[in-house]
Image (spheres, grey):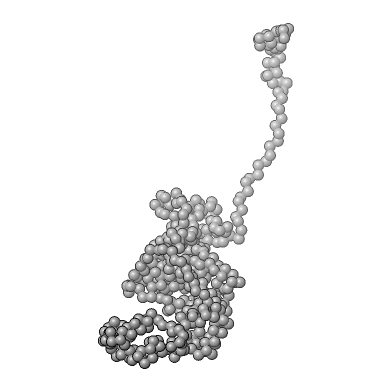
Amino acid sequence: MEGHLTMSKKERARLVVMAKVMKSEMKISEASELLGLSYRQTFRIAKRYGAEGAVGLVHRSRGRASNRAWDDGEKRKILERCSERYAGYGPTFTVEKLEGDGYGVDHETLRRWLIREGLWQKRRRRKAHRQWRARKEHFGELVQMDGSPHHWFGPDGQTACLLNMIDDAQGTVFALLDREETTAIAMRALWGCEPCEGWIERYGIPKALYVDFKNVYITTREPTIEEQLRGEDPLTQFGKACKKLGIEILGAHSPQAKGRVERSNGVHQDRLVKELQLAGISDLNKANAFLMETYLDGHNKRFTVTAKSRVDFHRPVPKGLDLRTVFCIEEERHVNNDWTVRFNNRYFQILKENDRLPRPGDKITVSEWLDGSIHLLYKGCELQYRVLPERPERPAPPKVRPSLPRKKPTPGPDHPWRQWQGQHKINPVCVKELAGGTKESPR
């Protein structure tokens, strides 16, 4: 036979064995044992080799299109759909969107098509060495929490922050969007405040939170004198709220330590951005509504895994506890002499009608709820107050009549001093002599 014949490694091994069979150097039973094939299959291969030679050992489907191959026209429609509507999307995410368009294709098949057409490139990343840590066994045992600033509404849209929460045991995700990563959005995500619900409203109170050392969650300031006397560690406003609910806050010293939420941020930066673009959403309120109603349920349904233990470590909210008094901003203030309190450049007049009226100089707690309302607390009781429209004026000091300049007193003619001076005249010469000199003393 003229020309070259391309054979695989397995086919070349069969060629050597079949040559020995044809020369009667090896039995078919021995050849089948050597090749790891059945006797019947080895007999068919030997028969084909005897009739066609080495060509008979080459696989019959080589060079032919697969029976399961896609039609070129259908393949071209899918690729045009990808380039028009899903340009830049990953193959796995694109397949999910194509299913909604009526195209059912495997993600690996689509990946090969996109790479062949130059619409996708392989991403090779060198991973740093890290020590593996097993997932927690119980749902609610540890919840990782992190903020992700990003252009969530496209490269030309405003930058916002996605506060992402993910359970370490089964990967359940909850998230909220806001302009920045602040104490208020952290409290809203953990608790939930109208119009959006939060983690506690959905699942309950978790055992612990895993966060970074951002000043929203953990503070590095020195404790005050009052905190030192009480034996307390300095806490942020978010930390105070978690302490009231018995939630332990753990600090991560590197992004890799809380890698689960970091990888989740990357998934959202790819999928959520495209989902918002497809839905035509460019507003924070509409984006949060989309998260609650559509995105989070679908995301959790696809990526959540089963925890090792069926025991849920979430605790219910204690009966009678108003979470508005927990997730709030609290600061201490001194009562002024006119029973006013200053907070955030606003002045509040404590009314006389209060049953427990603090005295001037006493400390009270000023609590600002997430809805913006202000509450004054004194020894566990809420005080009635009135918001002053402007800063109270201090009473003006009493006016003092200016004193006239004093004149040098002049003794009268009948003053005893004048009488004494007239009776006892002093000789100036005697005065000089008493001082140690004479009138004509040498210079």
Check the picture and name the quadrant holding the C terminus.
Answer: top right
Q: Image quadrant of residue 133?
A: bottom left
Could you say which quadrant of the image residue 235 lies in?
bottom left
Residue placed at 70% from the left, 32% from the top? 406
Q: Quadrant of the N terminus?
A: bottom left
- Residue 267 seen in this snapshot: yes
**Residue closer to the observer: 116 or 420:** 116
Is 51 rendered above or below residue 163?
below
221 on left or right of 410: left
**Residue depicted at x 32% and y 72%:** 309
Q: Residue at x 32, y 83 (%)?
A: 17
Identify whether 387 is placed above or below 401: below
Q: Is residue 268 above or below residue 23?
A: above
Q: Position of residue 220 (x, y in %)?
A: 46, 54
Q: Is residue 18 left or right of residue 202?
A: left
Where is residue 41 shown, x and y percent of the image?
31, 89
Between residues 1 and 344, which one lies in front from this camera angle? 1
Q: Residue 320's spot in the image, x, y percent?
A: 40, 69
- Is residue 242 visible in the rendered image? The answer is no
> How many marks overall?
0
Residue at position x 62%, y 46% in the image: 397
Of residues 217 and 205, the one drawn nearer to the viewer in this rendering: 217
Task: Tell me residue 393's x, y (percent).
Answer: 61, 53
Which of these two is toward me, 425 or 3?
3
